[in-house]
């Protein structure tokens, strides 16, 4: 099981609760003296959290300026407490200390847990992951401030209980009083009601480490398949392309092929849920059915764009190399197929699409639909993240020229078909991300609408976490980015994408006379 920030947060809270309990009942002089040094470590860690929330100088951004106003006063008080504790620690040098007493032991344990948790949060910034978007969310920042407030108050209670014994060691009572007041006031000021789901989002931030997937079981229930899809989707999002690595068209083509198969299965799953909902509620809950139908239509549009990406790579490049391993992607695709298939051992290597089970087998009741929709939502967004990684490789400096050089046709080598083909490929990737962002809202609503009243709070938290991880400026940034492709021929690129989009829609309508109700069979 992945290590998450909540593990360290719970550990720190338990340690400080125990420290407060022991200190307020009995603490000896040598134990009180031994508490000063771990208390100083705790204030240092809390200041690191505040420095991450807002810099010491007031920022120009209005929203961050408001946060800075909330952070700065507690920071000044904690800095004062930190200075006092450092001075006290120096004055007590050489004094007898009982470092094995529960109070200093638990304060030190809490400081270690919070410090390790802080390091965990930092792992998402270099290289940057989508969890960094969640950590920078204003609601989550307030949740961090709430963590600092609670720990400062706990520490203030410990030092207040130890004050009399530390005073007997000959230390200045005025400074001890000021220390206690600073810690407790910092906690009172920093407290803030957090936004719904913000604390849960903070607690769910995982250690940034790619775990190899466990072996696929021979058979699995729908619940197990959905849980496995979510695990694989997280593995795909965690994996990062090598910075400056050589573009592998074989990998990109494999990714697009897997995405086509996975999204075909996702589309079929949501279409089956729509039919099942009609069977269960033929004359009511029409809004839920409409949301399911919109989700299926949105997934079909994303599927079409992944088809365009795959065809773009086939048209542009002739690469004989074998693609590298992508265990999470392969497993997620297989699980998506088994979710809708009558064959519990269906595999990607069978090179044929799954034979569909009946809607009643997939979801016996409406309550069974929410987990399926949540796993589909995870999978669709993970594939969009994968597409964004591949797009970043395509538009990296020097890669456009490499693609032109590797093009199969002589016209492409001359920079005509090759240039337009690359523009169409980049446009298809961008539309994958754009259409995926559009369908996520419908999938969110469908997952919530089909959840039972008891499940709805947990589903809402799960969706809140996913939404906070998304970069709200992602889609516009994709089209505003001045890549090597659109710098050279911006107007030509715009007209080319418009023509390509119309052509794709026309081709889709010809191959799909049912008007999008049945997904086109992906070619392999």
Image: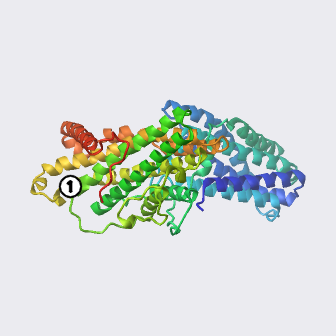
Check disc 1 and report its element: helix, strand or loop: helix
Q: Is residue 368 left or right of residue 424?
A: right
Q: Is residue 33 left or right of residue 283?
A: right
Front residue of this view, candidates 195 and 185: 195
Counting from the top left corner in percent of width and height, residue 22 is at 85, 55
Counting from the top left corner in percent of width and height, residue 360 is at 54, 50
Is residue 468 visible to us here? Answer: no
Where does label 1 land, which residue? 315
Above or below 185: residue 265? below
Q: Who's the residue at 44% across and 58% down the image?
A: 337
Q: Is residue 307 left or right of residue 85?
A: left
Of the 4 image quadrants, the one containing the N terminus is bottom right
Name the colour scheme. Answer: rainbow
In the image, farthest residue toward the top: 62
Q: Who's the residue at 49% across and 64% down the image?
A: 344
Counting from the top left corner in percent of width and height, residue 112 is at 67, 59
Front residue of this view, candidates 134 and 105: 134
Front residue of this view, candidates 215 and 417: 215
Local packing at callout 1 (Cα closer than 10 Å; few below 14, some 14-19, many 20+) is some
């Amino acid at each position: 099981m992945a290590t998450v920030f909540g593990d360290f947060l719970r550990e720190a809270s338990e340690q400080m609760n125990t420290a407060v309990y022991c200190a307020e009942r009995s603490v000896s002089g040598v134990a009180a003296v031994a508490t000063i040094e771990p208390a100083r470590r705790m204030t240092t860690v809390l200041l690191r959290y505040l420095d991450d929330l807002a810099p010491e100088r007031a920022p120009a951004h209005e929203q961050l300026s408001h946060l800075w106003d909330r952070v700065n006063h507690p920071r000044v008080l904690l800095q004062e407490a930190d200075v006092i504790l450092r001075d006290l620690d120096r004055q007590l040098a050489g004094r007898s200390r009982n470092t094995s007493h529960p109070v200093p032991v638990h304060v030190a344990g809490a400081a270690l847990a919070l410090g390790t948790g802080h390091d965990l949060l930092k792992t998402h910034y270099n290289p940057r992951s989508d969890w960094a978007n969640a950590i920078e969310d204003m609601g989550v920042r307030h949740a961090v401030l709430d963590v600092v407030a609670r720990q400062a108050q706990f520490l203030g209670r410990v030092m207040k209980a130890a004050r009399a014994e530390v005073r007997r060691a000959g230390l200045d009572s005025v400074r001890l009083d000021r220390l206690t007041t600073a810690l407790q006031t910092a906690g009172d000021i920093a407290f803030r009601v957090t936004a719904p789901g913000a604390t849960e989002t903070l607690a769910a931030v995982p250690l940034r480490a790619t775990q190899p997937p466990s072996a696929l079981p021979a058979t699995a229930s729908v619940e197990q398949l959905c849980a496995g899809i979510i695990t694989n989707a997280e593995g795909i999002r965690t994996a990062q392309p090598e910075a400056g690595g050589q573009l592998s068209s074989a990998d990109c083509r494999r990714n697009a092929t897997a995405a086509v198969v996975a999204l075909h299965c996702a589309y079929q799953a949501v279409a089956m849920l729509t039919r099942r909902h009609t069977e269960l509620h033929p004359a009511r809950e029409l809004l839920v059915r409409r949301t399911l139908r919109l989700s299926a239509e949105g997934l079909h549009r994303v599927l079409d764009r992944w088809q365009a990406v795959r065809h773009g790579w086939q048209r542009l490049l002739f690469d004989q190399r074998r693609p590298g391993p992508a265990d999470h992607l392969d497993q997620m695709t297989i699980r998506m197929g088994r979710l809708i298939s009558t064959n519990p051992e269906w595999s990607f290597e069978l090179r044929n699409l799954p034979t569909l089970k009946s809607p009643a087998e997939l979801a016996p009741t409406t309550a069974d639909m929410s987990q399926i929709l949540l796993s589909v939502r995870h999978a669709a967004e993970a594939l969009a993240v994968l597409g964004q990684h591949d797009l970043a490789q395509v538009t990296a400096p020097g890669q456009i020229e490499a693609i032109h050089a590797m093009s199969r046709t002589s016209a492409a080598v001359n920079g005509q078909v090759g240039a337009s083909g690359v523009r169409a490929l980049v446009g298809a990737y961008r539309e994958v991300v754009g259409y995926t962002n559009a369908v996520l809202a419908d999938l969110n609503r469908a997952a919530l609408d089909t959840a039972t009243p008891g499940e709805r709070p947990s589903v809402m938290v799960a969706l809140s976490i996913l939404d906070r991880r998304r970069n709200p400026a992602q889609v516009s940034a994709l089209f505003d980015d001045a890549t090597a492709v659109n710098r050279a021929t911006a107007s030509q690129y715009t007209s080319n994408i418009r023509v390509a989009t119309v052509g794709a829609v026309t081709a889709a309508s010809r191959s799909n006379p049912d008007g999008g109700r049945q997904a086109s069979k992906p070619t392999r």
